[in-house]
Image (cartoon, rainbow, N blue to C red):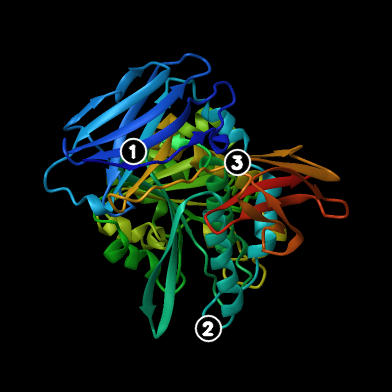
């Protein structure tokens, strides 16, 4: 008996474009379940525009979250050196496999050239300013809960729009429900290894919290915007931590109970105030005892007349490779950024000023982690005051820090020129899946007076189309079909970044649209 599960796809992953090399094109994906032979058969067609060497791996999941590459029992067109044409993978699945909950996925890549420098160049000061304009303002459970909730929703919406697997980790603290916001980008080859990029989003009650820690939030969101378009061998996990100002509560709870059982955290890039810069002499002070513990770093600050013009790169012995990754990324991609690194003994208990952020619970758990900071109150005298506003920040410095972190994370997670193709879920042996994700394009982008949205998909699908600001305000709304062109009017809108959102009962797609002057 042969039961068929069918999924027809035409994957032109426009969300994963590389500047100098096109990705392979895969189509006609379908899955057949052969109960007599105890095999799952995966058919597909593939083509590479540049005739690069193509690699394909079969992956499966029983929970819809963690996918692993299948090695045993797999024959046919899986592996390296796959040529263009119609293909078939056979998987002789184990007898104890629960077929009702199995999802099938293909990992596809070629040997196209990847230029991290081009990703670094995508970081935009104007987009940092747009996010900061929304985030700035007190964000505190006791005094300013409404804006705190708005910022949490904003982070979550940006994770969703970037196609991340988004979730919230709820926890209780002093009769309040805190929530860490998580956005996971699964690795193409290894979903057991995870790199975290984080910043806390809460502020103290009397401060607009632009540097502390709105600067880190916009940093996380900008790295999400850029890196979510590309693929990596290992996982990226973007986190907004809650209740940091109450004593690192959110990161403690994540380390205690938020980690997935299948993953190992390879390293944490924690941003803690990355926007304040001063080239004035004597604008940087040092903690008590700093010179005796870190004589080289102290000498560098003193030699430059105590100018607050550098990023402090704080790790411990377990984090030596992460410290080096920031130094190397700055030297290679952002040579304008001055970096001073500190290798803290043990878990930093001898230097409590260097434990005052969400990296510390990871140090305590033996996980490599960095605190990347402008120095907080040792440089920024607006720290924890009403004066911590966006007007005091240096966005050129901030963007350089973000570029450096982006390059370091991308290098560590091992970029790969590929993508995932979901082939379907074996929910039953007699159900047929028919779902095609349309290809969409926005032209021109950036635009001035109008933009054309082209959808290439099933004409039967009815979408609601919305043009929205990043904070959710709707400026244009209409309905359109899955095979159509729609002009979106832009006249009168302020320059900046907007979202074009397509919604149907089956799926939701969003793209960023930049309106220029």
Q: Is residue 74 visible?
A: yes
**Residue 31, numbered circle:** 1
Question: Closest to the observer: 9 or 489?
Answer: 9
| Residue at the extreme bottom | 175
Residue 121 coordinates in the image, percent (x, y): 62, 34
Does residue 182 appear left or right of residue 252 in this picture?
Answer: right
Whether 243 is drawn above or below 399: the answer is: below
Residue in the picture at 60% in, 67% down:
209
137 horizontally vs 415: left or right: right
Question: Which residue carries the number 2 mark?
Answer: 142
Q: Is residue 296 above or below residue 156?
A: above
Q: In this orientation, does residue 517 appear?
A: no
Label 2 – label 1 distance at C-alpha? 53 Å
Label 3 to label 2: alpha-carbon separation:
49 Å
Q: Earlier in the sequence, mark 2 or mark 1?
A: 1
Task: Name the mark on residue 457.
Answer: 3
The reply to whether dot 3 and dot 2 touch (C-beta < 8 Å) is no
Callout in the foreground (3, 2):
3
Q: Secondary structure at mark 3?
A: loop
Q: Do residues under tags 3 and 1 come within 8 Å of each other at their CB atoms? A: no
Q: Secondary structure at mark 2?
A: loop
User: Could you classify mark 3 by the number of other residues whose Cα lies within 10 Å: few (under 14), some (14-19), or many (20 or more)?
Assistant: some
| Quarter of the image where the N terminus is located | top left
Taking the image as shown, residue 239 lies to the left or right of residue 147, namely left
In terms of sequence position, does the residue under pointer 3 or pointer 2 come before the other?
2
At which x and y percent is residue 459? Answer: 64, 45
């Amino acid at each position: 008996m042969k039961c068929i599960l069918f999924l027809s796809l035409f994957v032109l992953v426009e969300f994963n474009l590389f500047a100098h090399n096109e990705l392979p094109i895969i189509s006609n994906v379908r899955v057949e379940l052969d109960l007599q032979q105890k095999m799952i058969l995966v058919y597909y067609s593939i083509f590479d525009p540049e005739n690069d060497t193509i690699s394909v791996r079969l992956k499966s999941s029983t929970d819809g979250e963690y996918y692993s590459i299948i090695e045993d029992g797999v024959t046919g067109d899986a592996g390296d050196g796959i040529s263009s044409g119609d293909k078939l993978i056979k998987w002789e699945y184990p007898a104890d496999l629960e077929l009702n909950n199995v999802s099938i996925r293909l990992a596809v890549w070629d040997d196209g050239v990847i230029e991290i420098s081009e990703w670094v160049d995508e970081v935009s000061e104007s987009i940092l300013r747009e996010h900061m304009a929304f985030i700035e303002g007190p964000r505190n459970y006791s005094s300013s809960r409404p804006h705190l909730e708005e910022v949490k929703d904003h982070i979550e919406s940006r994770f969703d729009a970037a196609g991340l697997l988004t979730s919230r980790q709820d926890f209780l603290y002093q009769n309040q429900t805190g929530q860490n916001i998580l956005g996971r980008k699964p690795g193409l080859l290894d979903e057991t290894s995870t790199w975290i990029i984080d910043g806390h989003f809460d502020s103290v009650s009397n401060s607009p919290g632009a540097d502390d820690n709105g600067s880190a939030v916009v940093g996380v969101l900008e790295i999400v915007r850029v890196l979510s378009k590309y693929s990596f061998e290992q996982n990226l996990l973007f986190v907004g931590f809650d209740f940091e100002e109450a004593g690192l509560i959110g990161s403690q709870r994540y380390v205690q109970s938020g980690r997935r059982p299948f993953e190992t955290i390879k390293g944490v890039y924690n941003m803690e105030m990355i926007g304040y810069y001063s080239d004035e002499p004597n604008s940087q002070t040092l903690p008590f005892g700093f010179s005796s513990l870190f004589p080289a770093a102290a000498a560098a600050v003193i030699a430059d007349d105590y100018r607050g013009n550098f990023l402090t790169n704080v790790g411990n012995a377990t984090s030596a490779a992460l410290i080096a990754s920031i130094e190397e990324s700055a030297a290679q991609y952002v040579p304008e950024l001055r970096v001073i690194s500190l290798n803290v003994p043990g878990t930093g208990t001898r230097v409590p000023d260097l434990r005052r952020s969400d990296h510390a619970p990871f140090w305590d758990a033996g996980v490599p982690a960095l605190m990347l900071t402008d120095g907080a109150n040792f440089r920024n005298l607006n720290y924890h005051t009403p004066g911590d506003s966006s007007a005091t920040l240096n966005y050129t410095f901030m963007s350089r820090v973000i570029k450096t972190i982006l390059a370091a994370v991308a290098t560590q997670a091992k970029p790969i020129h590929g993508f995932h193709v979901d082939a379907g879920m074996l929910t039953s042996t007699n159900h047929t899946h028919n779902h095609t994700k349309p290809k969409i394009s926005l032209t021109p982008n950036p635009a001035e007076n109008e933009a054309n949205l082209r959808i290439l998909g099933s004409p039967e699908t009815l979408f609601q189309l919305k043009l929205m600001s990043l904070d959710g305000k709707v400026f244009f709304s209409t309905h359109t079909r899955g095979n159509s062109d729609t002009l979106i009017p832009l006249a009168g809108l302020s320059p900046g970044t907007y979202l074009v959102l397509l919604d149907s009962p089956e799926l939701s797609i969003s793209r960023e649209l930049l309106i220029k002057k």
